[in-house]
Image (cartoon, grey):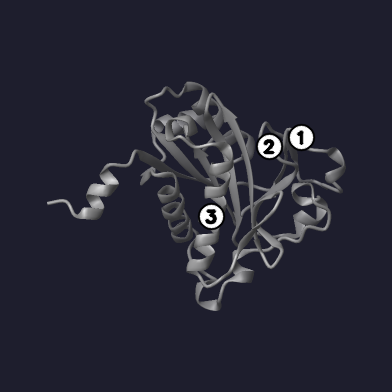
Amino acid sequence: MATHSESIRASFPALKVKSLGLCEYAQVWRAMQAFTDQRTPETSDELWLVEHPPVFTQGLAGKPEHVLNPGTIPIIQTDRGGQVTYHGPGQLVFYPLIDIDRLGLGVRKLVCNLEQSVIDLMTDHQVEADRKAGAPGVFVDGEKIASIGLKVRRGCTFHGLALNVDLDLSPFSLINPCGVADQRMTRWVDCVPDAYRHIDKAVLARRWVKHFARSVGLDAQHESADDETHALLPNHG
């Protein structure tokens, strides 16, 4: 007999959670576009978890003056909102491929849910985090630990949220992160008590997913990246 919690979960639409590992940014970006273009009203929502090799990404409204000195790190002009940011190994990136029209969510509500899921995750680990007016993302003592940039196409989202876990923060000094001069960045390992500092990133990701899925009324179902997903990532290997 199903438990009460199992019965409640069964009433929620599925959120297929797929871990892609370390993938080139442009490769995943094009795959998100393809997934969004190919989906139908019956397509299940997905959440892709990934880390990227070092890369700067510039949003649609991105101003070149916010890229100060990129050096050898590539810069990719994307179709998400926001200004320039940095991705690199040690940063967990969450890409919600969600039909927000079907869920009755607006973009602002989704951004709020993304932020709150990080705030709740930090609270679970004895860290107080918060929002900052006019600056999407999550902050700890004024330092940014999570950045958000989204794109909506045909009522469906892609791009998403980047959570700094244990990455090298020095490349952020080569840009004005999210278009804010002198915006200091921080990481999970520099914020949490010692007992949580070396938590496995896969465990941390699952804890975040639990908060996020609950906030948008979806049932997170962790799966391996299937052949259909890999077909969208032709160079993944």
Farthest left residue in view? 1
Q: Residue at x 76, y 34 (%)?
A: 61
Q: Are marks 2 and 3 in contact (CB under 8 Å)?
A: no
The amino acid pointed to by label 3 is Gln
Q: Which sits earlier in the primary sequence, circle 1 or circle 2?
A: 1
> Within 10 Å of the Cα at label 2, are there few (<14), some (14-19), or many (20+) other Cα atoms?
some
Quadrant of residue 75 in the image?
top right
Q: Which sits earlier in the primary sequence, circle 2 or circle 3?
A: 2
Q: Secondary structure at mark 2?
A: loop
Q: Secondary structure at mark 3?
A: helix
Give the distance between the C-alpha atoms of the residues marked 3 and 1, in whole angstroms.
25 Å
Q: Residue at x 44, y 60 (%)?
A: 203
The amino acid pointed to by label 2 is Gly
Q: Secondary structure at mark 1?
A: loop
Circle 1 residue: 61
Circle 2 residue: 81
Circle 3 residue: 116
Task: Compare residues 235 and 43 and report the one nearer the observer.
Answer: 43
